[in-house]
Amino acid sequence: MLRRHLLPRAAALLAALSLAGAGPLLAQRQSAPLAPVRPAFDSADVCRGPCEPKRVWIAIGETFLINAFVLAANKIVRPENEGFHIGLQSWKSNLQLGWNWDDNTFQTNMIAHPIHGSLYFNAARSNGMSYWEALPLPFLGSWEWEYLGETHRPALNDFFNTAFGGIALGEMSHRAASLVRDNRATGSTRVWSEIWGTLLDPMGGFNRFVNGRMNDLGPNPQEHFPSALGLTLQTGARVVGDSTGSADNPEGALTGILDLSYGDPFVTYKTPWDAFHVRAQLSLGDNLAGGGLNLLRAVGRVYGSEFTATDASNRHQFVIWQMYDYVRNPGYVFGSQSFGFGLMSRWRANAPWSVGTSASVQLVPISAVQTDSATANGRAYDFGPGAGLAFAANVRHRGVVAPIASLGYRLDYIHAVSGSDADHYLQVFSAEAEVPVRAGFGIGAAYNYYMRDSKFVTRAAEFARFPEFRAYVTWNLDYRPAPVEAR
């Protein structure tokens, strides 16, 4: 299906994100003081309420048009594929047979489907609907595609990955595009801001073109002014061991990481995803170290409740996170849509040096775990729900968004319901540290250890270990505007 052809858009999205912070909003990391600062703020810069009028029926109509476009494109690109020769008979058959589990590639199910879902979600967001109002659209669009867009039996994994993944990637890309676009800019600055914004959020760009907003001058949405913004680029070498965990014959490759931190989670909660973090890792080569996209992870705050005063030295907050995960290396291939519930703390929040900690329980509605052998339906990975635990700690200096050092541990238990008759236990330990060298630049090192223990009913257990070491140079940008309450 065309969804797998949408994968190049993921690369374009990452490239656009890397430039999103290069505008005038950002200042060099080491020059960022502890107290939030911003040039004189004009209240006319920000919309009071939604910048776009609410157009619910247009958003619903665009959801159906997205599917019609994908169907038409599939028929043009692959006219011989009978899977897109839909009609009354295929609709009747799908409605009678109901849900199934498909055998598409791991990348199609865990990346392309969520990107497709983000189009549905942002059809709503760019038509003036809030996060909560936009939630039904990815479910509606995915259901329509599964039952009416193909002759194949509807896939339950597609429905969940498209909907939950579409919400996560959709809100992330909506806010990133709002950050890049500037409704007060003119000339070439405006042209480039619209180009990058459309790459990040195609539906938003389409609606701005149709409604004439690409040329209009006016205030910006609240999403254009995050409570904090950090962008980090790491470039260096990646050295890995084999899937048994051995480091006797290490292999290496060039690798790069992009980190985007949008919003400060310790600024009082306002709306879902007002604070999120996304990390993407790309590597060169096709050897053991792996080439292409090794990791794409997004974590957004859906809800936060304060346990302490906002000016307390030690801050504590109950948080609900929404998470999207895609990890691909020879010993650990994992993708999931999940939610975390836990406590986030910042110790000595007002001091030059502060420590952040978090502990959470995770619920996983849908995930995929790759195994060493193909299952009965031809897939080399299992689908299933699960649960997990996660712990993290970091050290920050002078209120800078990106940490100087961090530690993390995550455990996932996944019970396969499609594929193998198995239970999967996945663990990741990570450590990372950076030494500033000069304004905005530094050197750093990171160590990750991936572990997968798979227990099967009908065959021997599998144990995979994947150590990874990275050494890199880093470039950081950091920005903190005036407090949100001042707006």
Image: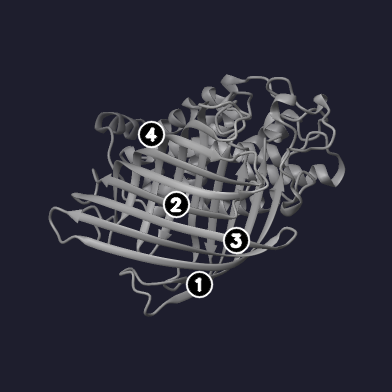
Point out residue 55 in the picture as x, y percentages from the top left corner: 62, 20
Q: Secondary structure at mark 1?
A: loop
Q: Is residue 252 left or right of residue 401?
A: left
Q: Amino acid at mark 2?
A: Gly
Quarter of the image where the C terminus is located: top right
* Sequence-wise first label, 3 or 1: 1
Point out residue 170 in the picture as x, y percentages from the top left corner: 55, 37
Q: Secondary structure at mark 4?
A: loop
Q: Is residue 55 left or right of residue 373?
A: right
User: How far apart, in angstroms, are the residues tagged by discs 3 and 4?
Assistant: 58 Å
Badge nearest the viewer, 1 or 2:
2
Depth check, front residue: 149 or 355: 355
User: How far apart, in angstroms, are the residues tagged by discs 1 and 2?
Assistant: 27 Å
**What residue would you read off at disc 1?**
285
**What residue would you read off at disc 2?**
408
The answer to whether marks 1 and 2 mark residues whose Cβ atoms lie closer than 8 Å is: no
Q: Amino acid at mark 1?
A: Gly
Q: Residue at x 23, y 61 (%)?
A: 462
The answer to whether marks 3 and 4 mark residues whose Cβ atoms lie closer than 8 Å is: no
The answer to whether marks 3 and 1 mark residues whose Cβ atoms lie closer than 8 Å is: no
Point out residue 224 in the picture as x, y percentages from the top left corner: 71, 35
Q: Amino acid at mark 3?
A: Glu
Q: Which mark is residue 87?
A: 4
Depth check, front residue: 470 or 424: 470
